[in-house]
Image: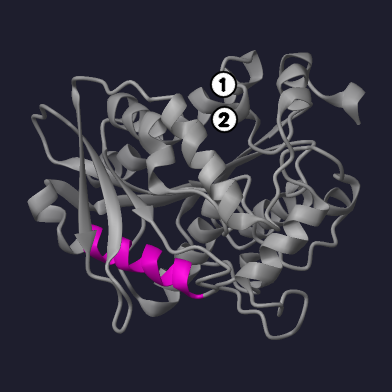
Amino acid sequence: MKNRIDPELRETLELFPPLDIDNIEATRQGMAAAAQMNEITIDESVVISEKMIPGLENNPSVRVKIYEPKERTETLPGLLWIHGGGYVLGTADEGDALGQQFVLEANCVVVSVDYRLAPEHPYPAALEDCYAALKWFSDQADELDVDRSRIGVAGQSAGGGLTAALALFTRDKKGPELCFQMPLYPMIDDRNNTPSNLEITGNMIWNYDLNEKGWTMYLNGKNGTDEVSQYAAPARATDLSNLPYTYTCIGQLDPFRDETLDYVTRLSRAGVDVEFHLYPGAYHGFEGIVPTASISQRAINEYVGAVKHALNRTKVAAK
C-alpha cells in the first residue's frame, strides 16, 4: 500500500500521528491546539463574521461563520459549507482558508455551520443543525444579498456525508431548493464493508477501525442494522432522482472510494448531472494534509472551479 501512495503525499503521512477517537475529548483539544499554532491568514478583501442562528424546534441555537467579499456589485450565489471529522471531530473554524478561497475565486457568500458532534449528540443532531443553517441561509438571503435560487451545499468527509444527507432531506421535506451539492470524499455508508473499507487499515488518516468507531458513535451502535435511515447514511437511499447538480471526488486509497463510486453511478442512472474525479495515489483528506502537493493543488483548483461553475450555471440558464 505504501508504494502506491503519491510520492509527494508519502512523507507527511509517515509523520502524521494516528487519530485516537477512543479519547475523543483529548483528540479534540489536541486538534484545537494545533489549529491555534497554524493561524490562517485573513485576506483583507474578505469579511468573516459569526452568528448564533435558531435551531430547529426544540433544538439549541447553531453557530455559523459567514465569509463574504468586502466589496460587491451584484447579488451573489451562496454556499453552505459543512466541515468533516468523522461526525465526532472538527469545528466550523477549520473552513477559514477554504471559505476565503471560495469567496475570492467563486465569487459567492459562504456560510459554514458548526453542527453538534457525536457521541454527545448522535444522529439526527448534526443533520438538523445543517438543515437549520440552510433554512436560515435561504430565509436571510435578502439580508445577505444572496440569490436564494443559487444556493449550494458542500463538505468534506463526514461533511460530505451530511451534504448528501441534506440534499436528500431537503428534497423530501420540500425545503429550500439547492442548485448544487458537492459531497467531497463523503462518509455515507455505515455498513463499512466495501472492498476499499476493508483494504484501508493502518495509518492512512482514516481507516476501517476509525470508520467503525465513528459510525458507532454517530448512530448510537445501530450502524449495520436495518434501523439506519437514508438521512443518516445516504448510501442506503434507494431513490436518488431529483437531486441537484453534483460534483464529487475521492482518492483511490481512501476507504470511502467504493461507496463514492457506487453513489456516483447511481446518481448518473437516476438522471442527476454529476462530475466525478478519482485521484490515484491519494489517501483520505490528502489535499488538506499536504496542500502543496501537485495532486492536491489539482484537486483543490478543480473543486473550487466546480463551485464557481455550478453556482453560476443557474444564472446563465435563466438568461
Viewer-nearest residue: 63 or 199:
63
Q: What separation in Å lies between label 2 and label 1 (alpha carbons)?
A: 5 Å
Q: Can residue 319 be seen in this view?
A: no
Is 257 on the left-hand or right-hand side of 299?
right
Q: Name the residue under label 1.
A: 291
- Residue 237: which quarter of the image? bottom right
Region rendered in magenta: 124-137
Residue at image point 56% right, 41% down: 30
Residue 303 screen position, x and y as percent: 50, 32
Q: In this view, does 202 lie above or below 64?
A: above
Viewer-nearest residue: 48 or 178:
48
Viewer-nearest residue: 255 or 40:
40
Label 1: few (<14), some (14–19) or many (≥20) C-alpha neighbours in 10 Å: some
Q: Name the amino acid type tagged 2.
A: Gly
Q: Name the amino acid type tagged 1.
A: Pro
> Residue 100: which numbered mark, if any?
none
Residue at image point 54% right, 56% down: 272
